[in-house]
């Protein structure tokens, strides 16, 4: 059967596959959220007696020694969708935790929404769950355990498809909550306690799914373990908190490995251990949000953390052949879903003679009409390259250009380093 996804970015790393080994029956992906591979490698090396389950998996694994980059931006929702579809975010469409739909003039936030987000992904790309259903048939069982991308999974609690038995889960939660590290409650870290509880519930779901008589055994599980992300944010990378989070997550992985052993499936399962992104050292007390500076300096933009979409106008500029008149039509830079760029009325236009990079004599001034049009007369003896037009359209960043259509930009190096003579000379 064709096991390739409908669209796959990049190439399959065939070197990772052992062609002599028996074909696995099922795939189990452990995703340790926000766990940079150096965090795991350092801990395995520094404490040889810890993390027995991750260590056992690693011993027989193909390892990407320098790690890998899931996606740009490397951040939860886009990365999970990349792992679940084999495509970059520019193809699966979930380009950021929050992003701007420029044709609909709307900011949306899958990561803010958290539940029922599968509809944001482009239907033209295939998910791994869908591929299993295509190859193994609709009766095969796939599960997204708290994975932010679960499109096509039969069991996906975040998509409100829950195959589990509530009473069974309650009993399991009590037993499995013993894996929680006491540190989180001692530190009064409510977020870590909540994430630890969520991870316990995820393991309980897996126990119920694999032990059920009325369901086929899952062919594919995408299992998100969230604790390493929240603790990484709160305690920082390579911290004592991270050590505890890794050990706790390792206990949960051990529970799953034992369960599969008990079910006679461990040897038939291909395990993948991965992450959606890493964790940079940060001083969260700074509440730094550099993206917003584009607005404080006066540009029009839509800003969501780590995404900036500049709102710009689209200009059609034309000077008559005799050089005596010119016209400009101002439109919104972003086309609507229909493909049309709406015209912008009431855009302020000022026209000056350009004298060595500064505006000189005023030649015309006015605003665009309801058709986005402004027409003006021009002295025929001044070349278009020496007539400066400034456009300030409502809701858009201002534009400066010469009548020949060339944009006039500030020399950013000069603006950023006004004292550096050398830079001016080379600018
Ligand atoms: Zn994440």
Image (tube, rainbow, N blue to C red):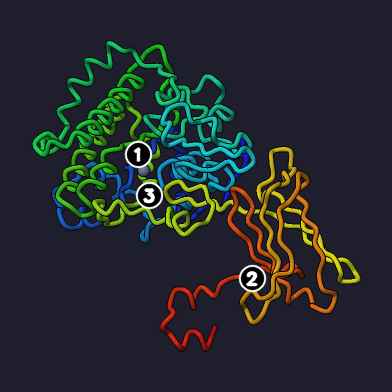
Task: Give the Cα separation between the discs numbered 3 and 2.
Answer: 39 Å
Task: Give the Cα separation between the discs numbered 1 and 3.
Answer: 14 Å
Q: Which residue is mark 3?
A: 277
Q: Which of labels 2 and 1 is toward the front?
A: 2
The reply to whether dot 3 and dot 2 touch (C-beta < 8 Å) is: no
Q: Position of residue 120 (x, y in %)?
A: 54, 34
Looking at the image, the residue that sits furthest to the left is 186
Q: Which residue is mark 1?
A: 30
Q: Which residue is mark 2?
A: 408
Q: Label 3: few (<14), some or many (≥20) within 10 Å?
A: many
Q: Label 1: few (<14), some or many (≥20) within 10 Å?
A: some
Residue for point 40% across, 23% down: 157
Ligand 1 located in image quadrant:
top left
Identify the mark nearer the N-term, 1 or 3: 1
Q: Is mark 3 within 8 Å of ligand 1?
A: yes
Q: Is residue 191 left or right of residue 416?
A: left
Q: Label 2: few (<14), some or many (≥20) within 10 Å?
A: some
Q: Which of labels 1 and 3 is toward the front?
A: 3
Q: Is residue 375 left or right of residue 312?
A: right
Q: Which mark is residue 239?
A: none
């Amino acid at each position: 059967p064709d096991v390739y996804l409908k669209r796959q970015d990049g190439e399959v790393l065939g070197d990772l596959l052992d062609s002599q080994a028996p074909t696995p029956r099922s795939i189990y992906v452990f995703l340790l959220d926000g766990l940079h591979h150096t965090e795991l490698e350092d801990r395995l090396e520094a404490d040889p007696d810890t993390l027995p389950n991750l260590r056992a998996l690693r011993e027989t694994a193909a390892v990407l020694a320098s790690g890998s980059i899931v996606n740009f931006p490397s951040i939860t929702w886009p990365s999970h969708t990349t792992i679940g579809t084999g495509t970059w975010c520019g193809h699966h469409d979930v380009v950021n935790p929050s992003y701007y739909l420029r044709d609909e003039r709307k900011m949306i936030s899958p990561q803010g929404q958290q539940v029922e987000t599968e509809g944001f992904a482009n239907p033209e790309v295939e998910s791994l769950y869908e591929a299993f259903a295509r190859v193994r048939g609709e009766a095969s069982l796939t599960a997204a355990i708290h994975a932010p991308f679960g499109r096509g999974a039969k069991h996906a609690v975040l998509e409100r498809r829950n195959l589990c038995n509530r009473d069974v889960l309650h009993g399991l939660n009590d037993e499995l909550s013993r894996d929680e590290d006491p540190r989180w409650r001692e530190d009064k870290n409510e977020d870590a306690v909540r994430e630890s509880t969520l991870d316990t519930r995820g393991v309980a779901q897996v126990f119920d799914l694999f032990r059920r008589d009325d369901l086929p055994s899952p062919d594919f599980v995408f299992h998100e373990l969230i604790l390493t992300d929240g603790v990484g944010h709160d305690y920082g990378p390579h911290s004592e908190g991270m050590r505890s989070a890794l050990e706790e997550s390792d206990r949960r992985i051990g529970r799953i490995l034992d369960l599969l052993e008990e079910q006679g499936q461990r040897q038939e399962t291909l395990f993948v251990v991965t992450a959606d992104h890493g964790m940079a050292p940060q001083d969260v007390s700074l509440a730094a949000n550099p993206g917003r500076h584009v607005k404080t300096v006066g540009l029009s933009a839509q800003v969501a953390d780590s995404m900036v979409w500049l709102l710009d106008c689209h200009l059609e500029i034309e000077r008559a052949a005799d050089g005596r008149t010119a016209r400009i039509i101002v439109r919104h830079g972003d086309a609507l879903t229909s493909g049309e760029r709406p015209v912008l009325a009431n855009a302020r236009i000022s026209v000056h003679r350009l004298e060595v990079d500064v505006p000189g004599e005023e030649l015309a001034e006015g605003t665009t009409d309801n058709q986005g049009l402004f027409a003006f007369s021009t002295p025929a003896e001044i070349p278009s390259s020496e007539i400066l037009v400034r456009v300030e359209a409502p809701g858009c960043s201002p534009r400066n250009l010469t009548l020949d259509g060339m944009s006039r930009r500030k020399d950013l190096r000069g603006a950023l380093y006004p004292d550096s003579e050398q830079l001016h000379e080379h600018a």
